[in-house]
Image: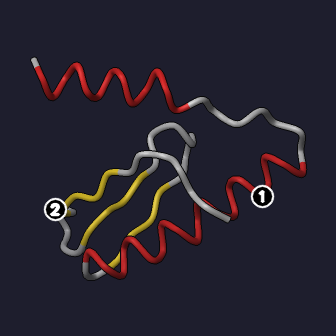
Amino acid sequence: MKLNYPILIYPSPEGGFVGEAPQLRGCLAQGETEFECLAELELVMSLWLEAAEQNHIPLPDTSQFVEHLREAVNA
């Protein structure tokens, strides 16, 4: 499954890294390295999307979110 949702990965104050997919509420992962965090986040995102599909929850549209990020970066 191709995951087309923006993600954030940032250092955790306790050590390691935290990753999140802001549009997928509660979709968080942690890892000792950025690579481990990304791998875990990809797994968590897949499970989140699978659960949404099984429960007939509409998937978030990324277009508005991406446009908001572009505006923030260009401001």
**Amino acid, disc 2:** Pro
Amino acid type, residue under disc 1 in the picture: Glu
Left or right placement of residue 56 versus residue 27 in this view: right
Residue on which the image places disc 2: 13
**Left-right relation of 49 to 12:** right
The mark closer to the camera, 2 or 1, is: 1
Secondary structure type for disc 1 = helix
In-front residue for pair 45/5:
5
Name the residue located 44 percent from the left edge and 40 percent from the top edge: 22
* Residue found 52% across the figure and 32% down from its top: 62
Where is residue 31 shown, x and y percent of the image? 35, 77
In the image, residue 10 sits, relative to residue 64, either above or below, namely below
Identify the image quadrant of residue 71.
top left
- Up the image or down, 20 lies above or below 30; here it is above
Farthest left residue in view: 75
Q: Residue at x 45, y 77 (%)?
A: 39
Of callouts 2 and 1, which one flags the residue occurring earlier in the amino acid sequence? Answer: 2
Crowding around mark 2 (Cα neighbors within 10 Å: few <14, some 14 to 19, many 20+) is: few
Q: Secondary structure at mark 2?
A: loop
* Quadrant location, the C terminus: top left
Q: Quadrant of residue 3?
A: bottom right
What's the distance in space between the residues labelled 2 and 1, CA to CA? 31 Å
Does residue 2 appear to the left or right of 22 in the view shown? right
Q: Residue at the spot x=68%, y=55% of the render?
A: 48
Position of 22 relative to 33 (above/below): above
| Residue 5 rendering spot, x and y as whole percentages | 50, 46
x, y percent for residue 74: 12, 23
Where 3 sits versus 73, above or below?
A: below
Q: Are marks 2 and 1 in contact (CB under 8 Å)?
A: no
- Where does label 1 land, which residue? 50
